[in-house]
Image (cartoon, rainbow, N blue to C red):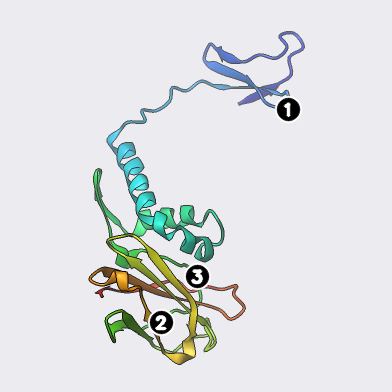
Amino acid sequence: MARFVSSTFGKISGKHGTAVAAVRKDGLCILKEYRIASNPNTPGQKNQRGKFGFVMKELNCLRRVFTQTYDGQYGINKAVALTMKTAVSGEFPDFKLDYSKLPVSVGNLYCTSVVKAEKINAYTLKISWNTEFTVYGSATDKVNLVFLNKKSKYVIEKNECSVRANGSVEIELPGSWAGNEIHVWIYFRSLNGNRYSSSCYICLIQL
């Protein structure tokens, strides 16, 4: 790409032979090689666009979660990019999302090596985890849970509902969720709030 100031021609733009000239906002003229745009409708490109649209639609219900766990309002974009690499299978238009590989949180704080969910009555789940931790964790780390209704795509967050040292917590879910299958994740956040663990998928459980 060439940059120039022409006292002869003044400001120029458009295609000139094998080059394209344009004028930037600051008034500087640029000249670069003209290249024909690649075909945007190859099978590979269609597949990639289709995958992106599929994942964005599936994860939109988790947008509020990603705002916290992926650090900001554009967190969903980071989550979509990672999910496309780790949790999607199939080819356009038959994509599938493996929720057990969906990272609702990422970070270097220690998560847990053992975790389970069990029903203790019609609408209440008991979530239990191993209280061990490494140098990248603490007994005071806050426990965060995410529940996704498979049918309605509605998400419930239980943020800072316990601490790592407690080993378990009981969570009551809405009665309207009776009979529905629920995806469940756990992740930890440090006491000062500036460190997260990567999430751990617990299970798909039916209320």
Q: Which mark is residue 112?
A: 2
Residue 17 position in % (x across, y down):
53, 11
The image quadrant where one finds the C terminus is: bottom left
Please tell me whether residue 171 is drawn above or below residue 167 in the rendered image.
Answer: above
Residue 151 position in % (x across, y down):
27, 61
Q: Quadrant of residue 178?
A: bottom left
Q: Which mark is residue 167?
A: none
Name which residue lies at 54% across and 87% down.
140
Q: Residues within 10 Å of mark 1 (few under 14, many from 20)?
A: few
- Please give the residue where the numbered disc 3 appears in the rendered image: 107
Secondary structure under badge 2?
A: loop
Which of 161 and 89 lies nearest the eye of the viewer? 161
Q: Is residue 204 left or right of residue 171?
A: left
CA distance for labels 2 and 1: 54 Å
Secondary structure under badge 1?
A: loop
State if disc 1 and disc 3 touch (CB < 8 Å).
Answer: no
- Please give the residue where the numbered disc 1 appears in the rendered image: 26
State if disc 1 and disc 2 touch (CB < 8 Å).
Answer: no
CA distance for labels 3 and 1: 42 Å
